[in-house]
Amino acid sequence: MASYDPSEVQIDLSAYRHGISESDIRHALAHPLMILPTEDDGFTISIGPARDGALLELGLVRDRAGIGVVHAMPARRRFLRGWLIR
């Protein structure tokens, strides 16, 4: 996924399902540590820190309207294994 301006990314209501705040989502968007394309075309996982440093997993989609966050939660081990966790 090409670069983006975090302030212009739309956050879908579904992204708040796990209780992650908008400010933490935008902080993680502004400081991505890892971008993982998936097999689902148009869907990307981004790992970045919340304001307190906790790693978040964000699900991003791109469509004609731009980029949107549809998923946000604490990063799961499966995305960190081999990178931060041995």
Image: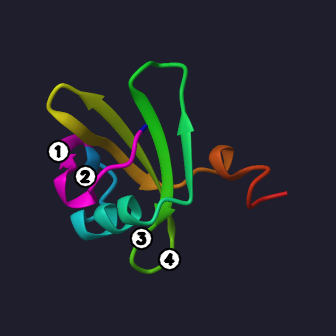
Residue with the mark numbered 2: 16
Most foreground residue, 13 or 64: 64
Mark 2 and mark 1 residues within 8 Å of each other at the beta carbon: yes
* Residue type highlighted by circle 3: Ala
* Label 1 Cα neighbours within 10 Å, binned few <14 / some 14-19 / many ≥20: few
Give the alpha-carbon distance from disc 2 to disc 3, as whole Å.
14 Å
Q: Nearer the viewer, mark 4 or mark 2?
A: 4
Residue with the mark numbered 4: 53
* Residue type highlighted by circle 2: Tyr
Give the vertical position of 42 relative to 22 (above or below).
above
The span shown in magenta is 2-14
Disc number at residue 47? none
Which element carries disc 2, helix, strand or loop? helix
Give the vertical position of 56 relative to 46 (above or below).
below
* Residue type highlighted by circle 4: Gly
Residue that appears at 30% across and 59% down = 19
